Image: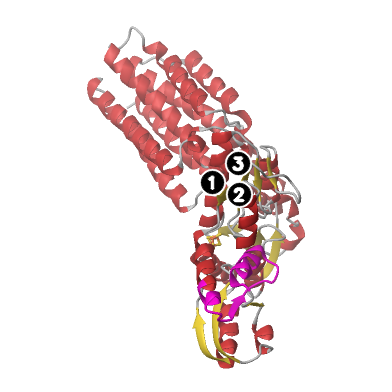
């Protein structure tokens, strides 16, 4: 049997990382000027490489920063570094995660009272170093229960955690600290995104034969996820699909996947696809051959092009009882050329081409139907082509934003894009309904299935943001195929 693959719902960028990346991209797009980051913005080589191509680099020692945009990453920095940047007249953009900012405020408050501050976290980690900067000479780093045992007893202490700390390690360490101090001001500052991700990883590891932990080698939160998974099942840590070792999947049936807070959605998607392929290869050459065909069929993208050609045939055939072979073929080939190899163009061109394809599609209607019906069909087809495109592009929005592809979802922010999608799905549904009444053709009601199918997909996408494997592509194209074939079949089959 092929693998049963499950990915934790929280996999992918956390809120803080996404916010920092969005700020950086916003500055880069608005100003067009080079941007520098204090340390790597996230622990992911592919993202850093894509950013380098857009002149976004890590700030080098002794680099002149006067007038340069410098981003403080989600981990935050010490007040001294912030002051130095201001003195050097850098244009500082503070993308410190608000949750890290809260911890900084706590330690600062207690350090000002000269109360010792214990940070339960990784010595040398950027976030911990930043927190120490707010502690003055009151800060102590403790990595776990072992080091807590060695602490000298005292009167009063403040205890916080690195935001990505393992809750179990925090609790065990805290218990020991409490025995050593008369008064302990404890703050569980582990961020919700971290605890949720760790809890999900623990649960999935218990149900899986192997856990694949995706993330950067230097990422502390990814390492912790691997530690948690290791306690429950066989675990492998990878940065990209190329790191997967087929041997480690021997005897495995259930595969669990989790990812660190700075792992982009497209890396997770590539890994899911590679593991799925490994599973089919294990079944023999025939299932693996069919799976590969399926991947190429969707990726090239034949399923999209054929779906749109079928929709064109269904609309024209219903209104004229003639099959527009030439027009449908042209529409299909144009979509294939336009979108081959997953190419994503830009917002203006995409909208223009959708409109042009719709005009080509309704040409065979000329002289057969009224102008009103023709316009409705034009809007229906144009909006449906655009909706399919928007759904596909919104799954790639992270990669497009980072690499600077100005697709519609990348240009609009997430909320605006969702609103745009809902409105255009509503417009296509309305057009199908009016067409059905205006043309006195109840069969057009079947076309309502297309926008309804898109809504279902949108719901699924919301639960699994940013993923788009073979099955997701099929789910997007299925409403178009089913509605078109349904309408053609109902008319062509002898009653
Ligand atoms: Fe912030 Fe938590 Fe991410 S502290 S950077 S949301 S892991």
Residue 409 in picture, x, y percent from top left = 48, 37
Q: Is residue 362 above or below residue 6?
A: above
Residue span colored magenta: 109-136
The numbered disc on residue 71 is 2
Q: Residue at x 54, y 71 (%)?
A: 108
**Label 2 or label 1, whichever comes before in sequence order:** 1
The numbered disc on residue 402 is 3
Q: Nearer the viewer, mark 3 or mark 2?
A: 2
Q: Residue at x 37, y 19 (%)?
A: 378
Nearer to the camera, 100 or 477: 100
**Label 1 or label 3, whichever comes before in sequence order:** 1
Check disc 1: other Cα within 10 Å, few if <14, some if 14-19, many if 20+: some
Element assignment for label 2: strand
Does the CB distance between marks 2 and 1 fall below 8 Å?
Answer: yes
Q: Residue at x 42, y 15 (%)?
A: 359
Question: Which corner quadrant holds the N terminus?
Answer: bottom right
Residue to which mark 1 is pinned: 23
Nearer to the camera, 342 or 155: 155
Q: Is residue 272 visible?
A: no
Dot 3 beta carbon under 8 Å from ligand 1: no
For ligand 1, which image quadrant applies? bottom right
Q: CA distance from mark 2 to mark 1?
A: 8 Å
Residue farthest along the front direction in this orientation: 87
């Amino acid at each position: 049997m092929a693998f049963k693959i499950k990915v934790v719902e929280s996999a992918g960028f956390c809120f803080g990382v996404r916010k920092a990346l969005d700020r950086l991209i916003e500055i880069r797009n608005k100003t067009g000027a080079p941007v520098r980051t204090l340390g790597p913005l996230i622990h992911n080589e592919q993202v850093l490489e894509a950013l380098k191509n857009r002149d976004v680099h890590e700030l080098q020692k002794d680099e002149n920063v006067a007038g340069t945009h410098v981003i403080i990453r989600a981990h935050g920095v010490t007040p001294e570094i912030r002051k130095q940047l201001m003195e050097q007249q850098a244009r500082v953009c503070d993308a410190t995660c608000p949750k890290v900012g809260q911890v900084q405020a706590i330690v600062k408050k207690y350090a000002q009272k000269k109360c010792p501050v214990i940070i339960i976290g990784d010595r040398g980690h950027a976030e911990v170093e930043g927190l120490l900067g707010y502690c003055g000479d009151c800060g102590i780093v403790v990595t776990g229960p072992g080091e807590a045992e060695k602490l000298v007893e005292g009167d009063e202490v403040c205890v916080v955690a690195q935001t990505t700390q393992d809750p179990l390690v925090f609790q065990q360490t805290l218990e020991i600290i409490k025995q050593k101090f008369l008064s302990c001001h404890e703050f569980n500052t582990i961020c919700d995104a971290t605890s949720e991700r760790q809890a999900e990883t623990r649960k999935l590891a218990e149900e899986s034969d192997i856990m694949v932990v995706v993330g950067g080698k230097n990422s502390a939160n990814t390492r912790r996820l691997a530690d948690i998974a290791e306690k429950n099942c066989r675990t492998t840590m990878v940065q990209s699909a190329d790191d997967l070792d087929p041997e480690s999947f021997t005897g495995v049936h259930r595969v669990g996947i989790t990812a660190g807070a700075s792992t982009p959605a497209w890396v997770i998607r590539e890994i899911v696809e590679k593991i799925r392929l490994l599973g089919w290869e294990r079944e023999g050459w025939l299932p693996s051959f069919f799976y590969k065909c399926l991947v190429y069929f969707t990726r090239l993208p034949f399923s999209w092009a054929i779906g749109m050609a079928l929709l064109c045939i269904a609309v024209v055939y219903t209104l004229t009882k003639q099959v527009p072979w030439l027009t449908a073929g042209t529409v299909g080939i144009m979509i294939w050329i336009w979108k081959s190899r997953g190419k994503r163009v830009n917002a203006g061109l995409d909208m223009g081409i959708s409109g042009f394809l719709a005009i080509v599609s309704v040409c065979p209607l000329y002289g057969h139907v009224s102008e009103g019906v023709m316009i409705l069909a034009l809007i229906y087809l144009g909006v449906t082509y655009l909706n399919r495109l928007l759904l596909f592009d919104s799954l790639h929005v992270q990669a497009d934003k980072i690499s600077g592809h100005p697709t519609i979802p990348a240009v609009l922010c997430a909320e605006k894009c969702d609103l745009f999608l809902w409105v255009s799905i509503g417009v296509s549904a309305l057009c199908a309904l009016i067409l059905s009444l205006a043309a006195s053709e109840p069969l057009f009601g079947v076309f309502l299935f297309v926008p309804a199918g898109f809504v279902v997909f949108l719901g699924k996408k919301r639960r699994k943001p940013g993923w788009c494997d073979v099955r997701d592509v099929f789910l997007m194209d299925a409403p178009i195929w089913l509605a078109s074939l349904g309408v053609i079949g109902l008319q062509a089959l002898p009653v």
